[in-house]
Amino acid sequence: MRFGAIAIIVVGAAGIAIYDQYDKGANYQRVDARISSVNDQCYLEKVERGVITKTTFTSDLTRCETAELLRKEHPKWQGYHVMHKIEVRVVYVSPVDGVSHQSSLEMSYFPSGKPLRAGEVFPVLASKTKADKTRMI
């Protein structure tokens, strides 16, 4: 019985991953976008697991330097992890209409581990049918 449940979960997860790759290939086209702004904020998070429950504690959004300092030096925040909330605004030419559009992408870490800067070129997937729809590669 337990093996059957695990098999169903594995097959379901594989199906979702396969569909996601199909969706990216069939409905989106890779385009180079220019970053217009990057808003990198952080928050502190701690997860406590009980026998049955899981409780997550988080702080408000703050500057990343402040979050790192609080985690290291303030007794209340020791044991917490610094988490990023990054919003990247990009400008790209849509394959639908050939016109420039803006889009916003959210991520929890920087690709390749290095910060993004305004003015840099950043690859995104632009929808082949909706001019203002994008997603991460």
Image: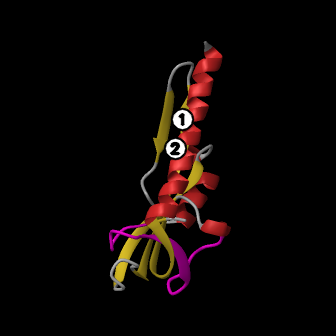
Q: In which quarter of the image is residue 102?
A: bottom left
Q: Mark 2 points at which residue?
A: 16
User: Which is more toward the observer, 14 or 56?
Assistant: 14
Residue contact at pointers 1 and 2, CB within 8 angstroms: yes
Q: In which quarter of the image is residue 116?
A: bottom right
Residue 47 in the image: state x and y as whole percent.
55, 37
Residue 29 in the image: state x and y as whole percent.
48, 72
> Looking at the figure, which quarter contains the N terminus?
top right
User: Horizontal placement of 87 versus 84: left or right?
Assistant: left
Extent of the magenta region: 114-134
Q: Does the magenta stretch include residue 68?
A: no
Residue 37 in the image: state x and y as whole percent.
44, 79
What secondary structure is marked by label 1?
helix
Q: Mark 1 points at which residue?
A: 12
User: Which is more toward the observer, 24 or 88?
Assistant: 24
**Which residue: 62% across, 15% down?**
2
Q: Which amino acid does label 1 sit on?
A: Gly
Any part of residue 43 in sight: no
Few, some or many residues within 10 Å of mark 1 (<14, 14–19, 20+):
few
> Looking at the figure, which quarter contains the C terminus?
bottom right
Q: Which amino acid does label 2 sit on?
A: Ile
